[in-house]
Image (cartoon, grey):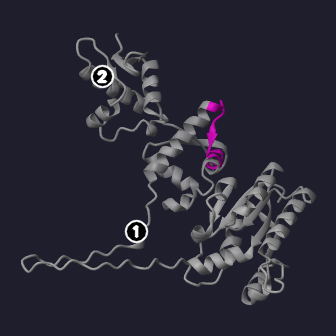
Amino acid sequence: MDHEDRIALFLDYENLALGVRDHHGGRPFDFRPIADALAERGRVVVRRAYADWSYFDEDRRMLTRSHVELIEIPQRMGASRKNAADIKMAVDAVELAFERGYISTFVICTGDSDFTPLVHKLRELNKRVIGVGVEKSTSALLPPACDEFLYYDRLEGVDVPPPAARRSRPARPSPAEPVPEPVVVTAAEEESARDVDTLAVQLVQTVAGMQGSSSGDVTASALKRALLRKDPTFSESDYGFRTFGELLRHLAAHNVVELAAGPAKGDPEVSLPEQGDREVAFGLLRSVVVDLAADGGAVALSGLKDQLRRARPDFSEKKLGYRSFLQFCKAAATGGAVELRWSPDDGDYLLTPQTP
């Protein structure tokens, strides 16, 4: 238990409940998916929800069964007391951060950007902050401020209603043309697909950056934390994987990364494949430069990447761990495949085949 994270949970209940009802077809808010997600991250020692509970009778009973402390912020004379609930919640969170040093993680359940200063202050006090909000009612300012942000809609156990089917008037076919079969567009096809290849590029860049910035090995847990720092909304489940380890094994099977036994069980070391693939890419670059350079001439960097892709359509310097094509060419020059120099007259880098 000493190694478990102690978690304090604060719910801006009106923001969360109304967000669910507005964007989930009027369905009621369910606390259980949040409780389950936090149970996987540590031990929740404080649960508090803030609202005028006269508007949420059924919810009050549901939260009480889940051992959530209800903080009453009544509305008076018909005036909105929303700011009073926000202020009370922020004051209580900061007070708890000072008084309960053993609490390492604060979970702020809201989509309101007004809580961004609170998140900054808690992180300044060396607390980890997890945000939870409904995707369509969460301000774009809030997720990047958190260490991790969970969209309620994506939590296990949340039943999201399918989007309404788009209807359009079909064109009247001519008598000579056959009537085409109707095309059924699924919700998954309408939603922008999360590309595993794009994730692989981001992951490779992160591993390369971590290897370059420190002499230590990159573990899976450290890599996951780095990815969350880049994108607090990152979750391997959005790409169809149950665990981060399963995602890494998938990428290892496709030779994107290599895995080895790490310092702890279940936390393997992650590295980029050996130089074989890079040497092949360097050889491809040299052969293209040789073909384009005439009589000892030079080839401009601009447009060269397109020439490589004509020879090898799947070429991508990012999959090799380079952040730019220029960085890849500099590495090839260091490896002796080509010569690279800056030409002030041309305003571009020029490449020539490396002489043996």
Q: Residue at x 84, y 82 (%)?
A: 74
State the count of labels. Answer: 2
- Report whether 337 appears left or right of 29: left
Query: Which residue type carries mark 2?
Result: Val
Give how far across and how far down residue 298 sits, in percent.
31, 17
Q: What element carries label 1?
A: helix
Give how far across and how far down residue 108 sits, in percent.
74, 64
Q: Residues within 10 Å of mark 2 (few under 14, many from 20)?
A: many
Q: Is residue 218 magenta?
A: yes
- Report whether 277 appears left or right of 210: left
Mark 1 lies on residue: 190
The picture quadrant where one finds residue 332 is: top left
- Report whether 257 appears left or right of 131: left
Q: How crowded is mark 1: few (under 14 residues within 10 Å), some or many (20 or more)?
A: few
Asked if residue 44 shows in the view, the reply is: yes
Q: Residue at x 46, y 19 (%)?
A: 334
Instruction: State whether residue 106 is above or below residue 325.
Output: below
Instruction: State whether residue 277 is above or below residue 297.
Output: below
Q: Residue at x 77, y 56 (%)?
A: 117
First to last magenta residue range:
213-226
Q: Does the magenta stretch include residue 308?
A: no
- Name the foreground residue: 65 vs 49: 49
Give how far across and how far down residue 331 sits, in percent.
46, 24
